[in-house]
Image (tube, rainbow, N blue to C red):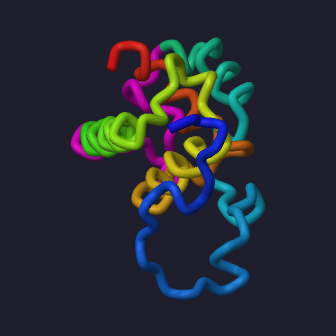
Amino acid sequence: MDPCQADATTFPQASASPKSKAELAPPTPSDYPSIRFWDREDWDKYLESPKGQTSKRGTMGYLEDKDGNPPSRETAKAICKLLRGGWVELVHWELAPPSWGRLSTSTRQFIHGLMESTYPHFKFANNGWKLDYLASNTYPAW
């Protein structure tokens, strides 16, 4: 299948109940003041700070729940397992790109939908940078 020809009907859709406008609106910093890393630049600055250099936030410290806490080790493992499962699905549909940066729009939407619906941590980011960061760092090894 030509990746440029993929559309919303290519991927299986989870059955979902209709969502309200509030549920469809992306979270904002004013809604979740405990979230610190809305942008990649915020995470990079934190890593360069003295506090960031001695942090015990773990390898996915940029991911935050609604209270600003990083995921537990178990949750981090489950996140990676689901992400790999999404990549397997892309392989199944013959849509897996050679690198994460070459992901088509429809496959990006599929992966983001899969991950964000299961782990809201990824919604607390402008432009989906947290999932793209994780995927671009782990996709080559997969």
Q: In which quarter of the image is residue 29?
A: bottom right
- Residue at point 48%, 19% (across, down): 137
Q: Residue 127: x, y in percent?
A: 73, 43
Which quadrant holds residue 103?
Answer: top right
Q: In the displayed structure, does residue 59 sit left or right of residue 25?
A: left
Residue drawn at (62%, 22%) of the image: 101
Across the whole image, how many numbered discs are drawn on residues? Answer: 0
Our reading of the magenta stretch's main secondary structure is: loop
Q: Nearer the viewer, residue 132 or 55?
A: 132
Q: Which of 131 and 53 is in front in this view?
A: 131
Answer left or right for 44 relative to 60: right
Question: Image height check: is 112 above or below 131?
Answer: below
Q: In which quarter of the image is residue 131?
A: top right
Name the spot of residue 18 as percent of width and height, x first: 57, 87
- Where, quadrant-wise, is the C terminus in this rendering? top left
Image coordinates of residue 41 in percent, x first then y, are 74, 25
Q: Where's residue 13, x and y in %?
A: 45, 67
Q: Which residue is drawn at 46% across and 47% down?
A: 69
Residue placed farthest to the left in the image?
74
Magenta region, residue range: 54-76
* Residue that lies at the very extreme toward the front in this rendered image: 1
In the rendered image, residue 4 lying in the magenta stretch gets the answer no
- Residue 123 vs 4, above or below: the answer is below
* Image point (64%, 43%), residue name: 5
* Residue 122 can be seen, yes or no: yes
